[in-house]
Amino acid sequence: MKRILTAMITVLILVSYMGHTQGTEADIAFFEFYESIAIRDAQLEATLEFTSEEDESDYWRDQLNFEKRLKKEMYRAYKTYIFFKRKAYQEHQKECDIIAYHGNGYNNKALFYEVHGMNASLEQADVTKNTGILPSMASKY
C-alpha cells in the first residue's frame, strides 16, 4: 500500500511540475507576442506619413483605443506592450529628432510611452512582478 501511495504522490508531483513548466513556456510566448507587436507598431509609427491632420488624428485615436482595450482586457499584455514600445521609441530617438520630423500625435505618444513605460520598468523586478515577465526577458532590452 505504501508503494502505491508513494508512486501516486510521485506521479502527481511530476505532473504538477510538467504543468508548471509548460505554463512558463506559454507565458514566454505570450510576452514575446506582445513584445513583437510593440516593436512592429513602433517601427511603423516612425515611418508613417499622413496626408492630412484628420488622418493623423484618426490613427492616433485608433491606437489609443487599442491600448485602452488591451489595458482593460489583458493588463499583463498591456504592460508588456507599453514597456517594449518605450524601448523601441527610445531606440528611434537616438537616430532621429522626433520633434522636427514627426507630428504632434507621434510626439505625444513618445512622451506617453516614456512616462508609462518607465513606470513599468523603474526596476526590473517591477516589470516582472506586475506583468509576470521573466527577468531575463526584461534585461535583454
Image: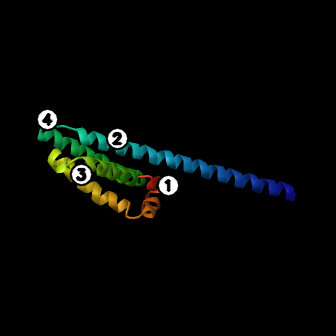
Give the image location of residue 40, x and y in percent.
34, 41
Give the residue type at disc 3.
Answer: Lys
Give the residue type at disc 2.
Answer: Arg
Give the image location of residue 47, x and y in percent.
24, 38
* Horizontal side of residue 56 vs 115, given as left or right: left
**Residue carrying label 4:** 51
Give the residue type at disc 1.
Answer: Ser
Q: Are circles 1 and 4 on residues that touch, CB within 8 Å? A: no
Crowding near pointer 1: few (<14 within 10 Å), some, many (20+)? few
Q: Tell me the element at label 2.
A: helix
Lower sequence index among marks 2 and 1: 2
**Residue carrying label 2:** 40
Q: Nearer the viewer, mark 1 or mark 4?
A: 1
Give the residue type at disc 4.
Answer: Thr
Query: Can you see residue 17?
Result: yes
Crowding near pointer 4: few (<14 within 10 Å), some, many (20+)? few
Instruction: Between residue 40 and residue 30, name the one nearer to us.
Output: 40
Q: CA distance from mark 4 to mark 3?
A: 19 Å
Q: Residue at x 16, y 38 (%)?
A: 55
Lower sequence index among marks 3 and 1: 3
Q: CA distance from mark 2 to mark 3?
A: 15 Å
Q: Residue at x 22, y 38 (%)?
A: 48
Q: CA distance from mark 1 to mark 4?
A: 42 Å
Q: Tell me the element at label 3.
A: helix
Mark identifier at residue 109: 3
